[in-house]
Image: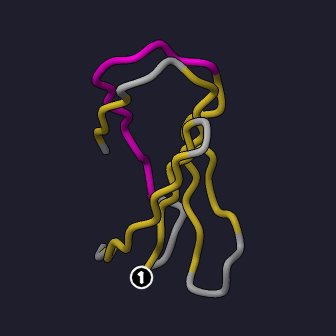
Amino acid sequence: MSWQSPVSAHQTLKVFDVFGNEVATLVDEYKPAGNYEVEFNAKALSSGIYFYKLQASSFTETKKMIYLK
């Protein structure tokens, strides 16, 4: 997963299942403005629909992804 942050801020990137349960925290730290990429190892998860949520300062974005084994 990749994203661009225009501001320096504490950032979190989390993955949730369709029931809203958190299944992974990929980022939870302060990062300066810039472009970022993180690898998500989903071997332990079953196929299905998941959501990932990026929070940076007051910005929040949630997107859907489909994981197929």
Query: Residue at point 66% right, 86% down?
Result: 19
* Quadrant of the rendering where the N terminus is positioned: top left
Residue 25 coordinates in the image, percent (x, y): 63, 46
* Quadrant of the rendering where the C terminus is positioned: bottom left
The residue pinned by badge 1 equals 49
Q: Identify residue type, mark 1.
A: Ile
Q: How many labels does the image show?
A: 1
Q: Is 34 one of the magenta-colored residues? A: yes
Q: Is residue 1 above or below residue 43?
A: above
Q: Give the range drawn in magenta.
A: 30-42
Residue 22 found in image quarter: bottom right
Q: Is 37 one of the magenta-colored residues? A: yes
What sort of colour scheme is used for the picture?
secondary structure
Query: Residue at point 65% right, 32% down?
Result: 28
Q: Is residue 30 above or below residue 19?
A: above
Query: Residue at point 48% right, 61% down?
Result: 52
Neighbour tally class for label 1: few under 14, some 14-19, many 20 plus, Cα within 10 Å? few
Residue furthest top in the image:
32
Q: Is residue 25 above or below residue 43?
A: above
Q: Nearer the viewer, residue 20 or 5?
A: 5
Q: Nearer the viewer, residue 29 or 46?
A: 29
Q: In this view, does 45 lie above or below 28?
A: below
**Under tag 1, what secondary structure?**
strand
Residue 20 coordinates in the image, percent (x, y): 67, 78
Does residue 37 appear to the left or right of 60 in the view shown? left
Residue 13 coordinates in the image, percent (x, y): 54, 45
Residue 67 found in image quarter: bottom left
